[in-house]
Amino acid sequence: MGSQGGWGQSKEFLDLVKSIGEARSKAEEDRIVLSEIETLKRRIAEPDVPRRRMKEYIIRLVYVEMLGHDASFGYIHAVKMTHDDSLSLKRTGYLAVTLFLNEDHDLIILIVNTIQKDLRSDNYLVVCAALTAVCRLINEETIPAVLPQIVELLGHPKEAIRKKAVMALHRFYQRAPGSVSHLISNFRKRLCDNDPGVMGATLCPLFDLITADPSSYKDLVMSFVSILKQVAEKRLPKSYDYHQMPAPFIQIKLLKILALLGSGDKQASEQMYTILSDIFRKGESTSNIGNSILYQCICCVSSIYPNTKSLEAAADATSKFLKSDNHNLRYMGIDALGRLIKINPEIAEEHQLAVIDCLEDPDDTLKRKTFELLYKMTKSTNVEVIVDRMIDYMININDHHYKTEIASRCVELAEQYAPSNHWFIQTMNKVFEHAGDLVNVRVAHNLMRLIAEGFGEDDEGADSQLRSSAVESYLRILGEPKLPSVFLQVICWVLGEYGTMDGKCSASYIIGKLCDVAEAHANDDTVKAYATTAIMKIFAYEIAAGRKVEMLPECQALIDELSASHSTDLQQRAYELQALMGLDVHAVESVMPLDASCEDIEVDRSLPFLSSFVQQSLEKGARPYISESEQSGMSHVNIFRSQDPHEVSGHTLRFEAYQLPKPSPPASAPIAFAPPTDLVPVSDATYARDIQPPPKVPSSLDALSADVGVRLRLEGVQKKWGKPTYSSSAAPSTSSTSQKTVNGATHLDGVGSMSAQARDTRDNLYDSRRQQVEVSAEKQKLAASLFGASSSKNEKKPSSHKTIKGSAGNVEKPTIMVKAVTSSEPTEKTSVPPPPDLLDLGEPAPETKPSVDPFQQLEGLLGPAPVQSTPDSSVVAGPREPDLMALYSDIPMTNLSGTSTNPTVTDLYAVSKNPQGATNVSTLKKGPNPQDSLEKDALARQVGVTPSGKNPNLFRDLFG
Amino acid sequence: MIHFVILISKQGKLRLTKWYSQYSAKERSRAIAELSSAILSRGPKLCNFVEWRGNKVVYRRYVSLYFCMCIDHDDNELEILEIIQHFVEILDRYFCGVCELDLIYNFHKAYYILDELVMAGELQESSKRVVTRLMDSLDLLVEESKEKANTIRNMIAQVTK
């Protein structure tokens, strides 16, 4: 196909791409693009641009825009192009507008008409193009304009169109859930479509709908399970296989849906156990896609009502992930573990060393994931270790987004589990010191309140100890050069309140420090205000205590400076400070009472001390004051009304009533249409549940499928088996472990036929593992602190509880051994060639020959090339991927074809051409279609694209 | 859900970008800058995932080209990795052995293929054959219309001669 071999673009465009490819700096690239924009502006505005030429201009605009430059001057031309009759141009137009325009762009309205027309087209390819555009461009306002047509297309004879129509509706649901709520029956119908593609696509909107309201789809559990069963049994057409797996993407989607439907629903979950264990059993952990299904299965098992057997299978799969060398799998393993420990916290214990390995891994992503896991399993016993580790990590990263997250997690854990006040203060200091600008201000206020109030125990001694340790640490920290503003505020406040409390520091010392703070942060008014007030407090205490405080020169300077400040707030504080110093002891005591930050300030709102004044004024003929509520009678009524929540929400959403008749009780209440935020404060669970059904009410079509009785019953179950109960049911470990023994026994039976040799190796493995464990004593210590004292499994005297566990561990290892054996078996390998896993391939390949220029290869073809290519191709393509094209063998062939198709090129390379060498090499050739790549290569050269030293890989087959 | 797809070369040059969620021009360029520096600097043998602004970016390297997809926090990374592979396999089939140059000069074709594969941020078709067949029929149609245009042009030329 001509369009595939060549790049049907003009010389100009090819030149542009080439020069951008060769640009050495961003500035140079920008210059090239800007001049291209100028050219395009001029050309596009010319009258009577031929359509085909215009198409190329549009593609060039797309290119320019992709590089991050503004091409808005050409948008309108792209819009115009969507009107074109020719499909090729129309597609280009649609492609351009979908890439250019966000759905809130003004030009969208001009396209809606075209889309409507195209959706009606006889040519299904035109309809496809329009549907693709619909997914990107139609916004909430324009949905009604195309919705009826799209619903109609759901019944189109072409499966490609049905599928895209489903996806378009899925998009509409994301944009405006209300717009398609009456179409649920259509989705259910499409689930039974006889084209697997359409069925697979339908899972997308159903997933969203079920996420929003699982209870209405419980009747579909059986259907999903049977679809999943059929898929797993390879009932789908072969073309849906992917790397020997039957339709894995559909399987994954189904598992996601089942996880939602089975969550907290015992009855629904029971229908899934069989298929889940089937999938675990068939699970293929040698390929990436097999593992992704296993992972999804684990997610599903951990989400549905727990079942011992499937949980065990999930734990097995998880431990395989964690023991893998592959970082991706370990990452998934950590994630899976995080899900499983919610149900059974003991699972983590077995993998503690793996977890610690991940925590210490140089890979940042893995490390963060592990922190996430630790965060989930923090208890009061291990909080210190975990938070310390988190802070250490936090200090060393620059990524603001993640720093904020981990800082807030530290704060949360510290607030929740702090073992001692001292530790809490220290921890908070560290967090503030290193991420103070990133944490919520609320956290700072909490800290101040905590220091002021103590930990709630009535132990004054401990509290004052806490305070003086805080003061001490703050005085030390003030020496640091750069502190975040929020932290400085806390410091100033604490120093002001408690700086001189324990008598260790003199008032003038503290005041001096505070003046330094104010001076060092001349631009931060808030810090200055805090410092000034703190100084004022110190003065007040001293005066109240009857001591004379001499005015430090820097303090006087500060007051002078602030009195002339632009900020009225600072001015006021400075004047107040000055005024305070002139007052006598008694006045100061009542203005600034000692350590009164926690006292409640009582405010008498009737202001009795003014009554004599009021009386006087009234006597003089002033009009009496009318209270606000009396001023407007209406508002009074409003207050009354707002006490009824139904009224309020009905009130805010009144306009909805145009579409739906006032619903009759009890099934629906108007609140159902309230935005979700309104539902949040509703604490009553049953109330919240009551209002779930109404969105379904309008679709009377649907009433058949979900009978209310069943739904209600399921809700009862959900409440009974709700998430919180899991942990409590899992807590009595005796029952769960005894069950484990049973399972362990059956497992042992299963592997009983294993050869003795395998057993030996297993034992060896176990021993070596034990040794390794003993070596890394440090890790073990860490493990002990993270997972509790029982962690040192190997040294622990086997109590009855532990023996059970040990046997379970033994059971699990053989399965790994079996895996190892099969993978090293050569016959297995040859009979079933594993799918090309490019994950591993991409890494070594570039290293082997990064600097090789194909052209040099070409010139040196006579001798070394064939020799060189042999080892290379074995390294790169290897025996595993026989179908992939090896680069080196390509080139000589290309050259040969250059002779026939392209004389000019041949002339250039005629010298290096050697037919014999070429045929030699071509025998090594494995590519799928040499002819095409030859043409491609020749064309590239004709264009003048040379793989420079900078990027020798342009020509390389992405798969090799 | 897939929020965006970016193809970026080892040298940091963009080869393709497709946004399924709403991002302003500023957010886009920031995302590209942040991700290309984060991903290109990662060594081999590490995870193919990067956490980014509360979402995750899954990337996979093919020779000199990185395919990156940004997904939600709770999505299945391994699946996305395979969707990328699926995409590349289809590209390979369509271009008969795809190389970076194909994607540079024929990037609009790559967009078309991506549109057939991923729609509204979800994988819409998992069969390689279905996608390739549709692409082929589209190309065929274009060829036909080209031929038709040529014959018409010839006819006009003959008549006016």
Image (cartoon, helix red, strand yellow):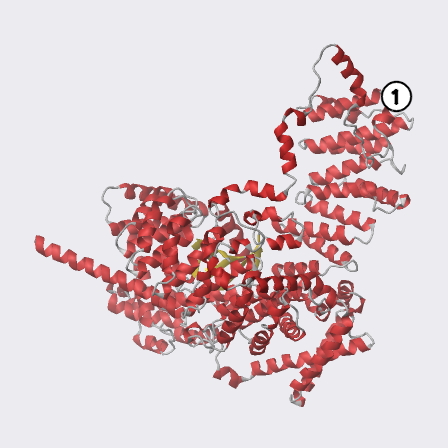
In percent of width and height, residue A332 lies at 60, 66
Relative to A932, say whether A178 is above or below: above
Lateral position of residue A315 relative to residue A165, left or right: right
In percent of width and height, residue A385 lies at 76, 58
Q: Residue furthest top?
A: A620
Residue A851 visible in rendering:
no
Lateral position of residue A849 relative to residue A373, left or right: left
Seen from the viewer's position, the closer of residues A469 and A109 is A109
In percent of width and height, residue A328 lies at 58, 66
Lateral position of residue A51 relative to residue A238, left or right: left
User: At 77% across and 56% down in the image, what residue appears?
Assistant: A384
Q: Quadrant of residue A529?
A: top right
Seen from the viewer's position, the closer of residues A267 and A887 is A267
User: At 77% across and 13% down in the image, what residue appears?
Assistant: A616
Q: Amino acid at mark 1?
A: Asp
Relative to A126, say whether A867 is above or below: below
The tally of labels here is: 1
User: At 70% across and 58% down in the image, what residue appears?
Assistant: A375
